[in-house]
Image: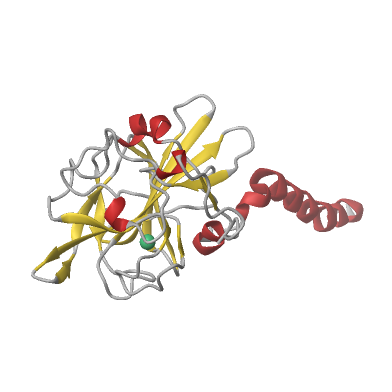
Amino acid sequence: MKKFGILLVLVLPAVSIILLFFTTGVSSRPFNADEFSANLSRIWVQPKTIEPVLKNYPFPLLSPAVTIAEGFEAYDGTLHDTPGDFHWAIDYVQTAGGAFLEFPVFSAHDGVVFQGEGNMWGKFVVVKDRSKISQGYNTLYSHLDSIPTRIPFMQFDINGSNGVLLPAGSYIGQASTTGNAKGIPQLHFEFHTVDLKTGATLRGDPYGVYQRLSSGFYPQPGDSLEGLLHYWETDNPFFAGSLPETK
Ligand SMILES: [Zn+2]
């Protein structure tokens, strides 16, 4: 009996620790948005390969007053960022009479949706599309507020978290000033490609423009992406070697 008691005291806790390890593994670490962001790289994406995913996002869904304020790769400085600093996303704003307004944001494609919060991104939403065979996509929408409560919080990482399945065009929040938005309401929009074999996740320019100080080169509301000049075709990549691979 005494032996059995010792067994309970010594062996059971060990077994439960081992079980806990195997059931949750390394992904039991809570999701860290800033760490995830820091580990992403930029990538050259050929717009031909992404157009079916994004369908000219976001202009059919947003007010015609929404414009691109900052392009991919480096800041113009339009939103009080330092010109030339790395920016591997597209920033959208809506202005009226010189003032920046909040505006509603919608998902660009069908997918599994969840929300999170980080120092840089503020409150954000990720839409995960794993419907393709070899390559997956994430779109990320940050500096949001008023995210619907039906969108669950990320638990571990993008691949491990359970979200809700929502169709393209679903309302996912207001473009606002959470995170590092310097008080200017804006949507910081990222497009990620995901290698489904290795899990490698890279940031791409959804419009394939790739030009520094370049928001004027991007499509504006009402513009079609059809026939858009793609900078990478003639100068690829003109800044190779001058930028780090991660930010
Ligand atoms: Zn941004």
Question: Residue sitting at 21 percent across and 49 percent down?
Answer: 220
| Tally of numbered discs | 0
Q: Is residue 35 above or below residue 204?
A: below
- Which is nearer the eye, 155 or 145? 145
Is residue 162 visible in the rendered image? The answer is no
Q: Quadrant of residue 82?
A: bottom left
* 112 relative to 243 in the view: left or right: left
Counting from the top left corner in percent of width and height, residue 91 is at: 32, 58
Q: Quadrant of residue 90?
A: bottom left
Q: Is residue 123 above or below residue 207?
A: below
Question: Residue sitting at 71 percent across and 44 percent down?
Answer: 22
- Which is nearer the eye, 30 or 93? 93
Is residue 26 visible in the rendered image? The answer is yes
- Which is nearer the eye, 72 or 231? 231
Q: What sort of colour scheme is used for the picture?
A: secondary structure
Counting from the top left corner in percent of width and height, residue 114 is at: 39, 48
Q: Quadrant of the C terminus?
A: bottom right
The residue most toward the front is: 234
- Which is nearer the eye, 238 or 74? 238
Question: Residue sitting at 53 percent across and 42 percent down?
Answer: 159
* 96 relative to 183 in the view: left or right: left
The residue most toward the left is: 97
* 170 relative to 80 in the view: left or right: left
Q: Quadrant of ligand 1?
A: bottom left
Counting from the top left corner in percent of width and height, residue 35 is at: 56, 61
The residue most toward the top is: 133
